[in-house]
Amino acid sequence: MVQIGTATELTEDGGKTGKPTSTPQGGLTIQLKNLRIRSAEKQFNPCFGDLIMNTYEAKQAARKARYEERAGQAHAQSDAVASQASRIADAIPMGQPILVGHYSEGRDRRYRERISRGFEQSVELQKKAEHYANKAAAVGKGGISSDDPAAIEKLQAKLASLQAIQETMKAINAILRRHAKAGADAQVAALVDSGLTYAERARELVTPDYMNRIGFAPFQLQNNNANIHRIMARIKELQRAAERTETEQAGDGYTYREDPQENRAMFLFDGKPAKETRDVLKRCGFRWSPTRSAWVRQLTGNAQWAAKDVIRHLDALNQA
């Protein structure tokens, strides 16, 4: 079990799907009732921490560094362009109007337009810098990827933490029911004595919510339990995927390959495929990968079915 009130902030809405998010300290957030729960989950952010990175985590770290570099370059360019536009604008005396009809009117207008374009370009570059900074911040925040070689171990650790939280919530509710007739003070004392929380949080637990409920509401337990079953199903799926062997099927002008190591299904062609073929590949979820020189998508059951549709299309074209 885990102790209530020691690490992670929880909220009231229960998280509809029960989807967890990670705090900067690596704790698992389960949206539950303005409480704090310490998770047993280890830090899984692939771009932070002192853990030794595997190949997927190294790719994530390289992607983050790449986005940060682009953000820095765009920010520096934005500052440079803004400074240049400001220096050009300093040449115009304060309050100096355009002399309409004067021989300098056209040149003055062009000069001012140049200043305006400079500041506009600076703003666009700043937006570009913010775009890449946001992409860098998002790297590693999307949960546990199936491409990660350690995905099964990480999911198992997350599953263990969710199960511990579930047992803790059930134990707290049981204590509250057992001491319901003794009153709130007795319930608080029982919770503190159990070691599951401390006095301040225990007092929050026995405070009725807008529906006069105390402890953890049924939907909070249901959401967390649904998340447990979701992760269990995903672990089984990844375990089945780990048992796959590399397969290759050659056709007329193409080769279809399933690579469990890269977790990718891919089509390789002798040359650039026709537009109709490219459209079918895109429609079936395959995207061009310059690094692999192939049309790829993540290796899943859906990908295998989609590959069969592509193969039928290719074979029909070759027979036509």
Image: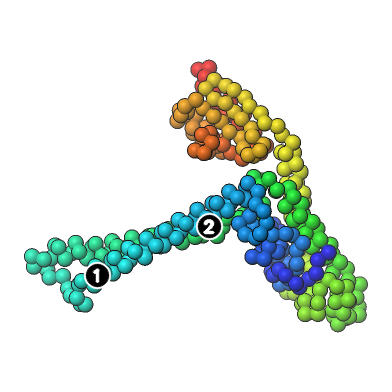
Picture coordinates of residue 177, whole percent (x, y): 88, 71
In front of the other: 262 or 142: 262
Please tell me which residue lies in front, 69 or 275: 69
Residue 238 lies, in percent from the top left, at 72, 43
Q: SS class of the residue under badge 1?
A: helix
Crowd band around label 1 with a 10 angstrom C-alpha radius: few (<14), some (14–19), many (20+): some
Residue 312 position, x and y percent, is 58, 25
Q: Residue at x 75, y 72 (%)?
A: 6
Q: Is residue 303 visible?
A: no
Q: Name the N-terminal-most of marks 2 and 1.
A: 1
Residue at 75%, 67% (x, y): give it.
38
Mark 2 belongs to which amino acid? Ala
**Residue that extends furthest to the bottom in the rendered view of this protein:** 185
Q: Which element carries disc 2, helix, strand or loop?
A: helix
Name the residue beneath numbered marker 1.
Answer: 89
Q: Specify the color scheme.
A: rainbow
Q: Residue at x 78, y 71 (%)?
A: 4
At 61% across and 30% down in the image, what residue appears? Answer: 257
When asked about the image quadrant of residue 42, the answer is bottom right
Taking depth in this image into account, of 135 and 46 the one nearest to the observer is 46
Residue 38: image tag: none
Question: Quick check: 97 left or right of 261?
Answer: left
Q: Quadrant of residue 166?
A: bottom right
Q: Distance from label 2 to label 1 (Cα)? A: 35 Å
The residue where tag 2 is placed is 136
Q: Are marks 2 and 1 in contact (CB under 8 Å)?
A: no
Q: Position of residue 155 (x, y in %)?
A: 73, 51
Could you tell me which quadrant the N terminus lies in? Answer: bottom right
Q: In the rendered view, would you say 306 is above or below 15?
A: above
Question: Mark 1 is on which residue type?
Answer: Ala
